[in-house]
Amino acid sequence: MLDGIKIALGYEIREGPWGGGNQFLASFKDYFEKKGSRIVHHLEEGSDLIILINPLRGSGTFNHKDIIRFKRRNPKTKVITRVNDCNKSKLNDVGDRDTLRLEACKVSDAVVFISEWLRDYYIEKGFNRGIRHTVIRNGVDKEVFNAEGYTPWEPGIPMKIVTHHWSYNWNKGADIYIWFDKLLEDPWMKEQFEFTYIGRLPRITPKSSEVKFKNIRYIPPLSGMALADELKEHHVYLTASRWEPGGMHQLEGACCGLPLIFNREGGGIVESCRGFGVEFTEENFPISLFKMLEQYRDFVLKMNNFSSTADVMNKKYEELILGLF
């Protein structure tokens, strides 16, 4: 059934470290092209299915208003809107983008939310539950992000903790990372832990200066095998993000074999992290570090069961698409 269908993805795929949304696009395209589908990135005549990624004008190759006009000429074309963001995850005023996404959902045959937390967020915002909808969480490429070469931590050496973020958004957990940086001023703490930050450094506003760490190792943005190899040089993955719609970074760390330390206010991130690491609050973050020291051996064994992979994700999209047709 998928062989020969034409799917319009509303975004161009970019090379390099461009965040979780871009990784979804690349994974989706690769999977469905192997199934015989034809992937295009504009609203071309003859498209059987449209996947809307972002309704904001200028953020993709088309938005929901373009789809409405296209559907007048092509009423049989099916539409799926993938909802992967929300205003709450942004520190700064970005306009009422939530309303735009709700408008986009109204022109869709099906809506995909990337976490239960995000689905419930939009239901509270007024999402029409009568529209066909489902939750399909993100997944990462296991050919790249896997535990081959990962060396577990052994007592007697500092536990190496790592995080990575493509965005400079302050809500990615900047305050917690700054706190960790200050904790590492203590020589005794340095004997217990090391911390590496990979990616773009956080800013309070897009125009403000980047945070400068004193005791944290910093590495500029990485992607693909280079990122996976660097993650596996560490023992534990830390994500301090708040109200993240779904997240990809914590999945990459976990698939590389690293147990997780994660923020209770992490939004959709919490769904993928629970059972695979230590949860913390804004008040007890230092305690979570020592809990990981105590419980690491138990968690590292559980990481073999972590299953948020691209294959699992894309098979669920395949089931949804087949159901539409």
Image: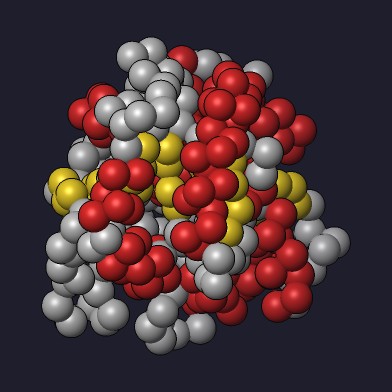
Where residue 97 sits in the image (x, y, percent)? 50, 76
- Position above or below: 176 against 112: below
| Colour mapping used in the image | secondary structure
Q: State the image coordinates of residue 159 (x, y, percent, origin top left).
A: 36, 37
Q: Quadrant of the N terminus?
A: top right
Q: Is residue 32 left or right of residue 117?
A: left
Residue 138 versus residue 58 in the image, above or below: above
Residue 77 visible to the viewer: no
Q: Quadrant of the C terminus?
A: top right
Question: Is 306 or 110 nearer to us in this picture?
Answer: 306
Write the residue at 28% across / 67% down: 182
Looking at the image, can residue 20 be seen?
A: yes
* Nearer the observer, 304 or 110: 304
Q: Residue 194 at what x, y percent from top left? A: 28, 45
Occupied quadrant, residue 155: top left
Left or right relative to 41: residue 88: right
Is the residue 10 above or below the residue 182 in the image? above
Rendered residue at 35%/44% (across/down): 192
Taking the spot 47% from the left edge, 43% from the top edge, the residue there is 250
Give the x, y percent position of residue 41.
Answer: 36, 43
Give the answer, above or below, for where 45 lies relative to 184: above
Q: In this image, 211 relative to 22: left or right?
A: left
Residue shown at 60%/53% (left/top)? 279
Q: Give whichever of 22, 203 is nearer the camera.
A: 203
